[in-house]
Image (cartoon, rainbow, N blue to C red):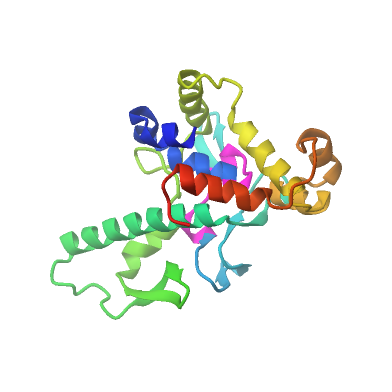
Amino acid sequence: MDRFVVESCYSSGADLPDLVRFLLGTGCRIGEAVAVRWKDVNLTDKPVVVDGTEIPPCSVWINGNIVNVKGKGLVRHGGKTENAVRMVALPEFVVTMLTVRWLIVWSAAQAERLRVDPRGTLDQADRQEHPAGGAEGTVQVERGQAFMANRLEESVFPSRTLGWRNPNNVRRGWRVIREVIGLEWVTPHVFRRTAATLLDDAKLTARQIADVLGHSRPSTTQDHYLGRGSVNPAAAAALDSAFRQASRMPL
């Protein structure tokens, strides 16, 4: 399924492959996923502080939700519930995807900066941490503060006009894909249930799984999200390995 989503012209044009991977790897709701900004993502091996909140290494801070408000259009608000604001550790395949995605954004910003300021006089001495730093620590890059500060406020999964993405459009786009591949039952909510089941198989407690999904009560997670079957501690690692092989990604 992942290979079809990646290779589908419609899917790629609708920017669905990366979003589908993010949903599967984090268990987020669609509205939460499209509300994630680059400032909410830490792809480094060290904690970073954003707006007074520490984001652990290789994690995403889920702190918003996109909704359609009558008379206002798409609005980002602070989450479904207090428990919906949470930190989620990112699987390796999601870290890889987001790193590539950020580098594209960063490169585009540098190209724009050169177009506006070809002599390189805009904030040449300004240095900030690059979110895509590797094992040796964060990569320091020179960039104009005005350009990159705006990028960090932008959505990781924006609309075609680079604004907030409508969750309903994501659902409609995915409906087309699942009908073509004959898996009508694979709704976006299935990704959330799958993530919960894999965490259950990996022997995480109901409380831990509820924290990942943003549930205030573990009973909600147990009653509506956890699958039945034998426990497999290697499930999460097996999923990552299978995903990489299917996508021809290096282990």
Residue in the foreground of this view, choosing between 43 and 91: 91
User: Hey, which quadrant is residue 124 in on the image?
Assistant: bottom left
217 and 234: which is toward the camera:
234
Taking the spot 44% from the left edge, 39% from the top edge, the residue there is: 17
Q: Is residue 153 left or right of residue 85?
A: left
Taking the view exactly as shown, the residue that stands out farthest to the bottom is: 125
Please report the residue visible at 22 percent of the width from the left and 59 percent of the height from the top. Answer: 111
Q: Is residue 237 left or right of residue 213?
A: left
Residue 112 percent coordinates (x, y)? 23, 58
How many numbered marks have been drawn onto this rendered protein structure? 0
- Residue 89 location (% of width, % of height): 62, 58
Q: Is residue 12 above or below residue 76?
A: above
Is residue 77 in view? Answer: no
Q: Is residue 168 magenta?
A: no
Q: Which residues are magenta?
A: 25-40
Question: Looking at the picture, how far across and down is residue 105, in whole percent?
Answer: 34, 55
Indicate whether 133 appears above or below 178. below
Instruction: Report the residue that reaches farthest toward the right.
Output: 219
Residue 238 rendering spot, x and y as whole percentages: 61, 49
Can residue 70 be seen by looking at this rendering? yes
Taking the spot 36% from the left edge, 77% from the top edge, the residue there is 127
Q: Residue at x 51, y 39 (%)?
A: 20
Q: Is residue 127 above or below residue 228?
A: below
Residue 139, quarter of the rendered image: bottom left
Residue 36 colored in magenta in the image: yes
Report the front residue among 61 and 97: 97
